[in-house]
Image (cartoon, grey):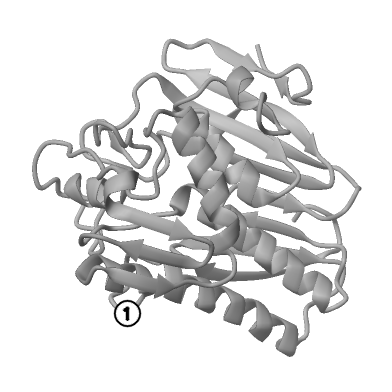
Amino acid sequence: MPHPGWADFSFDGIGTRWEVSTPSPLADGHRRRLLDVVADYDSAWSRFRPDSLVSRAARQPGSYDFPAGAADLEPLYRALHRLSGGAMTPLIGGSLAQLGYDGDYSLRPLGPPVAAPRWEDALEWNGTVLTTRAPVVIDVGAAGKGQLADLLSAELSACGIGEHFIDASGDLLNSSRAPVEVALEHPYDASRAIGTLPLSAGALCASAANRRAWGDGLHHVLDGTTGAPVRTVVASWAMAGTAMLADALATALFFVEGTRLREEFEFSWLTVYSDGHAEYSADFEGALFT
């Protein structure tokens, strides 16, 4: 619990565990509204349910109308796709399924890695309309959990609950100016921390090779140009004004150096590399253990 005495509302959504902390317990109506936001997001973007818009697009090429949040995802993904040379792409779903991270969670690779389709060849994304030219599997997981956290925060604010803290299995959003001390999970041992950080109003999101990992060296952060897991980075953290931006940039740090990303985005960051060294921005307020 981020603040002593606050109440927690916990639930499962989009394949992860959520905890929403508020100064007073949420009314049943407010809880239902939050769960409706999650259900609407899942029905559009989940590649793990056959009735979602993403699954329909994977079966049948065509134009699909997505929720309003798609218009926010598009420019962010397009910029990070450009900066990463195509390594970060919303078309990575097929590559994940190839390595076993599929709709059935089989965790059994079908064969060697397969690169994602080229965005310009397979997908036209204009605002909320996504047009696929071939059966492709769209996956916005690199930014989606963060965006959903932002949507839940907006719903809480609309309900008059301006102070709240959202924990989406380690991706955090704090609407209060009162800082919360956060532990930075060790990339090789989830029971340990490599440091701490005070999170005031804003979001902190992380990406790590030890999360959603399976098989021999397989994990969910794939290079879209090869379809293979990234080996040079093992963990990253990004702090930004919105959870969507922090979530996306935490993944982007696996492909692009933080100093390059800072040229186009306002955020602070920490990246831990597989050779043991770490790099971070001067304004990253965390304290790393020696």
Q: Name the residue under label 1.
A: 51
Q: Relative to 122, does residue 226 appear above or below in the rendering? A: above
Q: Which of 87 and 165 lies nearest the eye of the viewer?
A: 87
Locate residue 60 relative to residue 243 in the image: left or right.
left
Q: Where is the N terminus found, in terms of image quarters?
A: bottom right
Q: Position of residue 115 (x, y in %)?
A: 22, 38
In-image side of 110 versus 189 (left or right): left
From where the camera sits, is residue 42 visible?
Answer: yes
Q: Residue furthest left?
A: 111
* Residue at the image position 64 percent from the left and 42 percent from the top: 246
In depth, the one of 176 and 78 nearer the eye is 78
Q: What residue sits 42% from the left and 17% below the top? A: 274
Count of numbered circles in the view: 1
Q: Type of residue at label 1?
A: Asp
Q: Which of 62 and 256 is in front in this view?
A: 62
Where the C terminus falls, by quadrant? top right
In the shown orientation, is residue 137 left or right of residue 284?
A: left
Q: x, y (%) of residue 52?
A: 36, 75
Answer with the quarter of the image where residue 106 lies: bottom left
Place of residue 250 in the rendered image (x, y in percent of width and height, measured from the top left): 56, 36
Relative image position of residue 78 (x, y in whole percent): 49, 43
For the view shown, which residue lies furthest in the bottom direction?
29
Q: Residue at 51%, 69% (x, y): give it.
A: 12
Other-residue count near label 1 (Cα within 10 Å), few / some / many at <14 / 14–19 / ≥20: few
In which quarter of the view is residue 257 placed?
A: top right
Residue 186 seen in render: no
Circle 1: element type: loop
Of residues 235 and 86, the one nearer the viewer is 86
Q: In this view, does 53 lie above or below 173?
A: below
Q: 179 above or below 133?
A: above
